[in-house]
Image (cartoon, grey):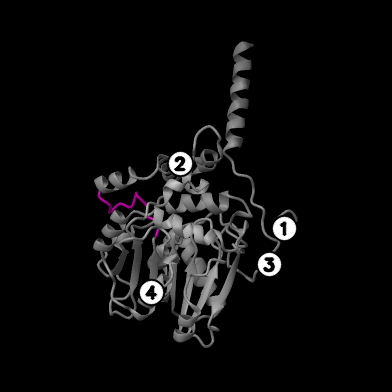
Amino acid sequence: MLFRAAAVLLIVLLGLAYQSIQPPPPKLCGSPDGPPITSPRIQLKDGRHLAYKEAGTPKEKAKYQIITAHGFGSTKEFVFPVSQALVEELGIYLLSFDRAGYGESDPNPKRSVKSEAMDIEELADQLEIGPKFYVLGISMGGYTIWGCLRYIPHRLAGAGLVVPVINYWWPSFPAELSKEVYGKILVTEQWSHWIAHHFPSLLYGWLTQKWFPSSAIIGGHPDLFPEEDKEIFKKIQAMPNPAGDKPTQQGVHESLHRDLMVAFGKWEFDPMNLSNPFPHNEGSVHIWQGYKDRLCQVELQRYVSKKLPWIRYHEEPNGGHVFMLLDGYGDKIIKELLLGEKPSVM
């Protein structure tokens, strides 16, 4: 009898433990208990909806079409900081979208590096922006651009990665280099990245438990950013935030957590084995990196650019993770992407 009672208790405890690591269902936009739909959306082939925002020169008149992929905890409302003067001078059409699970785009439980690239291609086709276009990914949106370089290179006129996320488990990284750089990040991030890579099904439970600190990036820990970034944040906080609570309004798991699972998970390819998508210099690929960035480390970006010499690497000596928000830097990046100006390397 005692053994049976212990067995029942164990089963109950295991059941409770299992329930605690299962994420709740997302609150879909437009559903009875979900947020309202306020943005234009397309329906993808798999039935999901993708919300988007158009800006700049009308696409029918534009000379350049740029699709931007937002970063972690952001939405399509983040419009890359390019001046209206440059937009008009060059004729730039800007298309941003809520990546799956963010804002008003439906979650994708099967989200992957490939699915993000496919979403971009389908968005471009349904909006009829042309056979080729530029892509620009910021921070976590960088893995979306790596996906474009792998899966839809034939659709690209050029590609830019601004302080792109790095996966420490890419096979081409020397083990000692990955270990050294990985050891520099906050312990909370080491744990969350490790779980996202090795045991993604446990990530929700880890990030929502209350016994230990779980993620500095989700909590906005100040040690994640250098003083240069903090000064920029002070200016930003004085401005209205158009996104508000929209990034995670459908739930944190299919937005923030899923991002970590994809970015630091097991990729289907190694970016450092990619071929040059522009062998005849008909376009270019760029990485912009801040030397003082604590989220996406400069040592690994340098290694990637050396392994892929066709990438034009730009390094800002006094830049952190958000240096592109400083006055003039957005225009500089766009000119380098579209006009092919020579990179500036430390």
Location of the C terminus by quadrant is bottom left
Within 10 Å of disc 1 (Cα), the crowding (few <14, some 14-19, many 20+) is few
**Label annotation for residue 332:** 4
Judged left or right of residue 37, residue 285 is left
Quarter of the figure with residue 179: top left
Whether residue 171 is in magenta: the answer is yes
Amino acid carrying label 3: it is Thr
Which residue, as the protein is rendered here, is positioned at the far top? 1
Residue 164, horizontal then vertical, whole percent: 39, 60
Q: CA distance from mark 1 to mark 3?
A: 13 Å
Q: CA distance from mark 1 to mark 4?
A: 42 Å
Residue labelled with disc 3: 38
Residue at x-position 57% and y-position 49%? 253
Quarter of the figure with residue 74: bottom right
Within 10 Å of disc 3 (Cα), the crowding (few <14, some 14-19, many 20+) is few
Foreground mark, 1 or 4?
A: 4
Asked whether the beta carbons under mark 4 and mark 3 sit within 8 Å of each other, the answer is no
Whether residue 297 is in magenta: the answer is no
Amino acid carrying label 2: it is Phe
Residue 262, horizontal then vertical, whole percent: 46, 53
Residue numbers of the magenta segment: 164-174
Residue at x-position 46% and y-position 60%? 232
Residue 39, horizontal then vertical, whole percent: 65, 69
Residue labelled with disc 2: 199
Asked whether the beta carbons under mark 1 and mark 3 sit within 8 Å of each other, the answer is no
First in sequence, mark 1 or 2: give its number: 1
Residue at x-position 36% and y-position 58%? 269
Does residue 158 appear in this view? Answer: no
Q: CA distance from mark 4 to mark 3?
A: 33 Å
Foreground mark, 4 or 3?
A: 4
Residue labelled with disc 1: 31
What SS does tag 4 mark? helix
